[in-house]
Image (spheres, rainbow, N blue to C red):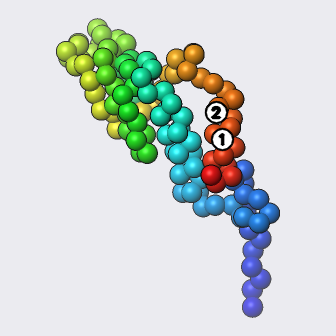
Amino acid sequence: MPSAAAPRRSAFSSPSHPCPSPSLSIYFAKMLFFSYFKELVGKEVTVELKNDLAIRGTLHSVDQYLNIKLENIRVVDQDKYPHMLSVRNCFIRGSVVRYVQLPPDGVDIDILHDATRREARGG
């Protein structure tokens, strides 16, 4: 009878809890960002999309899929995207986001570290 392989270990594992599946690790990462972005509702952010469009606006909401709703938007490069000048609010699907630039005063490193530790422990 073949012997069982040793369980994998990761940043999310402990001696009593083997490494979660890669999809579970992605879930933890998404939930970490979701929790953090919820704290930024009402603040101005810049969202850069995978098609190079950068949109600045007030974060209205974010969901567990990291879909983002922005209000009072303006396009960073208005000459390149003149058709976006009349748009004031938008919904951005999470899968098309490349970067989210946060306001300098919106980044509290201690809260981010604590959230990372909580997510790593599973709660």
- Image-based side of 91 in relation to 36, left or right: left
Q: State the separation of the CA atoms marked 1 and 2.
A: 6 Å
Residue at image coords 45%, 20%:
43
| Frontmost residue, 86 versus 16 | 16
Q: Is residue 46 visible?
A: no
What type is the residue that disc 1 sits on?
Thr
| Helix, strand or loop status at disc 2 | helix
Q: Is residue 39 above or below residue 7?
A: above
Residue at image coords 34%, 25%:
70
| Frontmost residue, 26 versus 103 | 103
Q: Are marks 1 and 2 in contact (CB under 8 Å)?
A: yes
Please give the label number shown on residue 2. none
Q: Is residue 119 above or below residue 86?
A: below
| Helix, strand or loop status at disc 1 | helix
Residue 1 point in image, percent of width and height:
75, 91
Residue at image coords 65%, 31%:
111
What residue did someone put label 2 on? 112
Q: Is residue 60 above or below residue 56?
A: below
Q: Residue furthest right?
A: 15
- Image-based side of 90 in relation to 26, left or right: left
What type is the residue that disc 2 sits on?
Leu
Residue 77 point in image, percent of width and height:
35, 11
What residue did someone put label 1 on? 116
Q: Is residue 54 above or below residue 69?
A: above
Residue at image coords 68%, 38%:
114
Residue 18 point in image, percent of width and height:
71, 64
